[in-house]
Image (spheres, rainbow, N blue to C red):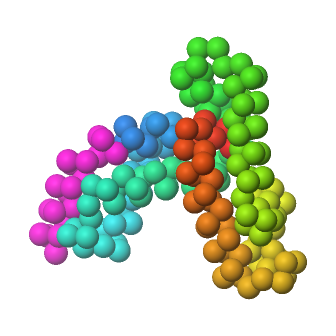
Amino acid sequence: MDSKLDKYHSIFVSHYGDLCNYASLFVPRQDAEDVVCDIFTNLIETKSPSEVSRNYLFTSVRNRCLNRIRDRKSSKAYQDYIAERLSEYFETPDESLFMDVKEQLCKAIQDLPERYRQVFILSRFSGLSNKEIAQQTGLSVRTVETYITSALKILRVVLKDYLFLLLMII
């Protein structure tokens, strides 16, 4: 057991700084450190050290940060943080930039296949659960999940140039 903890300690020491720096691209530094520590705590409980790769760690950090942003996007402090981060990337963020991003997002959603678009809008803009969408559309819950996943994949590809801005705005 000590050998396992030693391996995790080694992984933690060698990746902690890079993971915190990466996470701080998405969330404030304190939250970044919390995210990284949470990931390592979860890893120790669920995975063996041999299953942990650098890519796995960075993907876990990104996903955990995006979940944190999603969960806190209505928080005033997070809105202020996001505005501050945007201003770091753009000296004078003007309304036209945001309108351009919004326009590209709307166009990308309109270009989705009809069923994907319908299910995606019900999920993301109407706030319905997958079960409610399935009942409303006559689809199975699994089909609804597949449509949402497919729509998100398409949007990621189409909006790849705008993805960082969208994450900060959404």
Q: Quadrant of residue 7?
A: bottom left
Segment tinted magenta in the rendering:
1-19
On the question of residue 77 being in view, the answer is no
Q: Residue at x 37, y 37 (%)?
A: 21
Is residue 153 shown left or right of residue 40?
Answer: right
Q: Residue at x 84, y 60 (%)?
A: 126
Q: Quadrant of residue 4?
A: bottom left
Is the stretch drawn in magenta largely helix, strand or loop? helix
Q: Residue furthest top?
A: 92
**Closer to us: 161 or 81:** 161
Q: Residue at x 76, y 22 (%)?
A: 95
Residue 17 image position (x, y, % from top left): 29, 40
Q: Is residue 42 above or below residue 37?
A: below
Residue 11 belongs to magenta span: yes
Residue 9 image position (x, y, % from top left): 20, 57
On the question of residue 61 being in view, the answer is yes
Looking at the rendering, in which quadrant would you find the N terminus?
A: bottom left
Residue 14 image position (x, y, % from top left): 20, 47
Looking at the rendering, in which quadrant would you find the C terminus?
A: top right
Residue 118 belongs to magenta span: no
Is residue 12 shown left or right of residue 106?
Answer: left
